Image: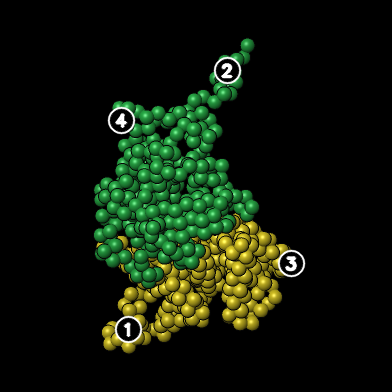
Amino acid sequence: MNDVVLAVEGLSAGYQKNINILADVSFAVRQGEMVGLIGPNGAGKSTLLKTLRGLLEPLSGRVEIEGSETSNLSSREFACEVAYLQQDIEISFGYSAREIVMTGRYPHLHWWEKESDEDIRIADACMAYTGVQDLAERPVHMMSGGQRQRVLLAKVLAQQTPLLFLDEPATGLDIFYQEEIFRFCRELCDRGKTVLMVVHEISLASKFCSRLMLVGGGRIISDGPPSMVMTSENLSHCYGVPVRVVQNPMTGSVEVFTEPPPDAGRRALLLDTILGRGKA
Amino acid sequence: MRVGNLPNAIVLPILTVAFLGAVFLSMACGQIDIPTENILATFCRSVGLPFLSEVPVTPEQETVLLHIRLPRTLVGLMVGAGLGTSGVVMQGIFSNPLADPGVIGVSSGAAVGAVAAIAFGFSETSLFALPISALCGALAAVILTVFLAMRHGKIPMMTLLLAGVVVGMMLGAVTAGILTVLSEQIIHQYLFWTIGGLDYRRWDHVIMGVGPILGGIAVMLLMARHLNVLVLGDVEARAVGMPVAKYRLGLLAVASLVTATGVCISGNIGFVGLVVPHMMRLIVGPDHRRLLPSSLLAGGTFLVFCDAVGRVIAYPTEVRVGIMTAFIGTPYFLWLLRRSRNTMQ
């Protein structure tokens, strides 16, 4: 098939030499797929995303985007292929929403050029799409988490790239904004964008994503449509605690919950000390 | 609403008026006060305009204006504008509003160069000896700082900041060490240099500084849009396709060169490079395409204004401009900070 937009072969990644957080990972993503990367904290999901985006040097292996190896792309060419939304960005100096969204146009301009009316039109459309056009002149650091995240989403959309990498885009948002982020991505993928997102909202991920990758122990444990990946067995194995997956007959979506770990009884003994009641 | 969003239509005229006012004040005030029409007449005469030829200008006035106050004012404008823009750029490079142009060892390196020139006596040999020695010191300090912070071809910003502090301390010790073996009179000469001043700046100083400072400012102005991206931090800038290391190092070099040149021709003038960018950010907002030009104007204006006030405030003694900048700038800055905090809440 020639609609593979992202091909990963034998990729090992990590922050230090000889310490692989991910070892020998291979997969391919087709155009229009909405891929959710799930797994426990510290499993290497963000590391994988950063390495794919070229923000971390891969320890070995290769990454191809639309047929060209990423190590051969210039910074600008790369940024025209993939937009990346990082976790916890701090925006200081009081930049307004519009100024932030405009930085998404950066890779499309030569260093001496200034933004054209067309760039402004694109930025405005992206802000209107994520519903923040009324906040355009407000400083981002004074916004709520939900508003901020939608501004940042508008920014990566303004980059107009075929691929979108999102690192925990919904974390810390209220239920409406969480779903809203997933809905945006669903809609974009239906129109041909390809999205890779690191998410902790497993139920939402299995509802909206077309494909899930379960990352754990330095490799991809399971990769496929949500119904295949989201099994009690897979999740229990990956998270290392008993996990139950139940289909809710009323909503048709999947509910996930964990059971108390075996050492929960021992912890109860500490409660007296913690609550300051065990003096006698 | 956000502070620091005043439209150009308000800010530009105010800055321009303040700029002209400061220049005028600097030309008019001092040991002899020169009336406005005499200043204008001298100006018209020297550039060949056929106005005000009936106003009598004494040769003394003309000398003071053309050979003392004009170069002094020009040096002040250049250094102030240079420090203002380099301050903006340094704060942008480090994504840190507390960075100032001297942060990576420029000032302390220049001090070592200066004290060496004074100690070994070659500051007497030529007008250029001290500034050039200070410039070499400043550039060597910057190179040392960058070299210390560099690992595997990368320069982590926090390490660079800390390396700058460490190099600054070390060079401070070197300066102090040299000073302890010098005579009192030489120490006084050095002290005079460390508190920056614009007195006795001549056309030679203007010529010395004009190239690097104006060239550097031009480069920084061209890079304004890139600074808007760089200031958001390493990852964010790389994510939108900026070759971060290249831009950072380039801007660092330009800002350091401008600062070093400023320090060399007028001594160590603190405060302008830290506070002018702050003030302007509160007034025009963080977009570098507005912030840089306004900091340029405001930096020059502020320094020349401080210099003029310093000349008359304790007449007949002159208060050096390095002292005036702190005295005039601090209260104004505090007022701005408090006001902006109130409007933000």
- Which residue is more in the foreground, B103 or A115? A115
Any mark on residue A272, and which?
A: 2
Relative to B30, B55 lies left or right: left
Q: Residue at x 47, y 78 (%)?
A: B210
- Asked which secondary structure carries label 2, the reply is helix
Q: Are marks 1 and 2 in contact (CB under 8 Å)?
A: no
Instruction: Give the labeled residue for mark 1.
Output: B44
Q: Is residue A172 above or below residue B109?
A: above
Q: Residues within 10 Å of mark 3 (few under 14, many from 20)?
A: few
Which lettered chain is shown in yellow? B
Q: Residues within 10 Å of mark 2 (few under 14, many from 20)?
A: few
Q: Residue at x 32, y 88 (%)?
A: B48
For the residues tagged 1 and 2, is the chain the same? no
Kind of residue sitting beneath label 3: Val
Q: Are marks 2 and 4 in contact (CB under 8 Å)?
A: no
Kind of residue sitting beneath label 4: Thr
Q: Chain of mark 4?
A: A
Q: Where does residue A227 sit, x and y in percent of width and height?
A: 39, 37
Q: Chain of mark 2?
A: A
Which lettered chain is shown in green? A
Any mark on residue B52, and which?
A: none
Count of picture labels: 4
Instruction: Give the labeled residue for mark 4.
Output: A251
Any mark on residue B181, and which?
A: 3
